[in-house]
Image (spheres, rainbow, N blue to C red):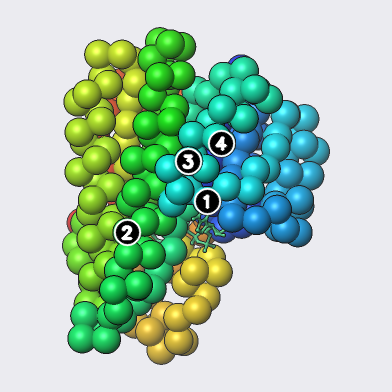
Amino acid sequence: MELLKGKTALITGASRGIGKAIALKFAQEGANVAFSDLNRDENMENTEKELRELGVEAKGYASNAASFDDSQKLADEVMKDFGRIDILVNNAGITRDNLLLRMTEQDWDAVLAVNLKSVFNLTKAVQRIMIKQRGGSIVNMSSVVGVNGNAGQSNYSASKAGMIGFTKSIAQELGSRNIRCNAIAPGFIETEMTRKLPEDVRKEWIKTIPLRRPGTPEDVANVAVFLASELSSYVTGQVINVCGGMST
Ligand code: NAI
């Protein structure tokens, strides 16, 4: 299938993990892929190579999604290199977990800047482009922790809940321009982010999942393809949980 043929996607934080899986699935569906991450490192070069091997145009950009100026520059460069942006996936994210008693101001500010301000930065940077193109799809990577909360993750949860409010507002603002905006709320997905968790915490999490397994980055990427493509042409302002039934 080539559900995304002729489209160009911009995905943040996609040198590894869920972002990379989305980039690869998009490429398999025929999309050209521009992606960002903090540095041009081995991960970025490998991802770029794997994408090009799928026969699409692909380029990685070193760009900090938390920076307003970097985000504007990124959108400008992608337009120069690819000529259009049809899909934006705001995927870059970090955790700085701690109980509120021990959480520092730096932990709070860093998580809000990378997870939430980035969504404002990039959406604002592509808004005019999508309006001019008379359409677009924006997919924001939230979390079940943004939907339900989680002890020890108040900063992360607040940032991910904020993304949901932003998603619903932008869907209402830009719907008349044929620009859709939806969020994905993954549950427990196996990536480097979750590999940091102690084994006992991991086991406890898995017990709470009706499907009794962690999700894979590909499980999330499949839903991203749906939201990015015309398959979801009448879906906007929604949050889709991809969590094995953990949150119902
Ligand atoms: P990851 O840590 O494996 O990958 C995140 C990528 O974002 C990394 O390549 C990192 O370098 C990049 N990044 C970090 N800060 C950045 C910045 N300021 N600018 C540009 N890139 C930056 O994480 P993973 O698991 O792939 O997560 C991807 C997204 O999915 C995140 O937003 C995360 O919060 C969300 N998520 C992940 C879940 C999981 O269980 N792994 C569950 C729910 C949501």
Write down the residue under mark 2.
112
Residue hosting label 3: 69
Q: Amino acid at mark 2?
A: Leu
User: Which is more foreground, mark 3 or mark 2?
Assistant: 3
- The crowd level at tag 3 (other Cα within 10 Å; few <14, some 14-19, many 20+) is some
Marker disc for residue 64: 1
What type is the residue that disc 1 sits on? Asn
- Are the residues at dot 3 and dot 4 in contact (C-beta closer than 8 Å)? no
Task: Residue at 40%, 19% (x, y): give it.
Answer: 128
Query: Amino acid type of disc 4?
Result: Leu
**Amino acid type for the residue under numbered disc 3:** Asp
Determine whether the residue tagged by mark 4 lies in a helix, strand or loop.
Answer: helix
Q: CA distance from mark 3 to mark 1?
A: 9 Å
- Inter-mark Cα distance, 1 to 4: 9 Å
Query: Quick one: 56 or 240, which is closer to the camera?
Result: 56
Whether residue 242 can be seen here: no
The answer to whether 193 appears left or right of 168 in the picture is right
Give whichever of discs 3 and 4 has the lower sequence position. Answer: 3
Q: Quadrant of the C terminus?
A: bottom left
Quarter of the view holding residue 182: top left
Q: For the residue carrying disc 4, how many other residues have a C-alpha within 10 Å: few (<14), some (14-19), or many (20+)?
A: many
Q: Does any atom of ligand 1 lie closer than 8 Å to the CB of label 3?
A: no
Work out whether mark 2 precedes mark 1 in sequence or the reverse, and give the earlier one: 1
> Does mark 1's beta carbon lie closer than 8 Å to ligand 1?
yes
Q: Earlier in the sequence, mark 3 or mark 1?
A: 1
Q: Which residue is mark 4?
A: 74
Q: Earlier in the sequence, mark 3 or mark 2?
A: 3
Mark 3 touching mark 1, by CB under 8 A? Answer: no
* SS state under label 3: helix
Label 2, residues with CA under 10 Å away: few <14, some 14-19, many ≥20 = many
Disc 3/disc 2 C-alpha distance (Å): 17 Å
CA gap, disc 3 to disc 4? Answer: 9 Å
